[in-house]
Image (cartoon, rainbow, N blue to C red):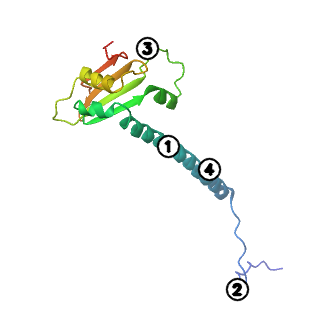
Amino acid sequence: MSLQAPLPPGPGQPSPPKKRTGCFVAAMIAAGVGLLVVLVVGFFVWKAGRVVLDMARDGMNAPGTAEVRAAGCDTAMVMSMDKLLAMFDAAGAPPGKTPTAIVSCVMNAGKTPPTCDEVARAYVGAVPSPTGPFTVTVQVTGILKSQCQKLYDQSGKAL
């Protein structure tokens, strides 16, 4: 009885099939799960970005923005607090204390910005009956601190 090593397959003979190890299968499952997570997160980021873009577009075309720009603002935006709160699901805010809108005035650096009172007068002149108190913010690009930020009642009187 002689013990000889098996001969390698010759021409025309198929090689023995390779066995997939458990590590390879686990790596493929992990890669599939990772790809699925990336796709789901990517979808939600895309959807949230789209909502924010739509809100910004609506805010820049809201009633009163043309008049706020005419008061001296380079960019004007009026954001509805109802839409903002709905986006962040912030139900239960106390009524009457929360502004119904944020009126934002942004100036390019090097220009003299209008005061919050001037912006509020322009907004109330364009939207004669705001639904509740509103906040005015005046910001200059490149400067982190707002020039002013005030809360006003429906008539445009500072609170």
Question: Of tags 2 and 3, which is closer to the observer?
Answer: 3
The one nearer the camera, 33 or 73, is 73
Q: CA distance from mark 4 to mark 3?
A: 46 Å
Q: Amino acid at mark 3?
A: Lys
The one nearer the camera, 127 or 151, is 127
Q: Position of residue 140 (x, y in %)?
A: 23, 32
Q: Position of residue 30 (x, y in %)?
A: 62, 51
Q: CA distance from mark 1 to mark 4?
A: 18 Å
Dot label at residue 97? 3
Q: Earlier in the sequence, mark 3 or mark 1?
A: 1
Q: CA distance from mark 2 to mark 4?
A: 42 Å
Q: Earlier in the sequence, mark 2 or mark 3?
A: 2
Dot label at residue 10? 2
Which residue bears the numbered disc 4?
33
Q: Amino acid at mark 2?
A: Gly
Q: Is residue 107 above or below residue 33?
A: above
Dot label at residue 45? 1
Q: Amino acid at mark 1?
A: Val
Q: Is residue 130 above or below residue 59?
A: above
Q: Residue at x 44, y 18 (%)?
A: 98
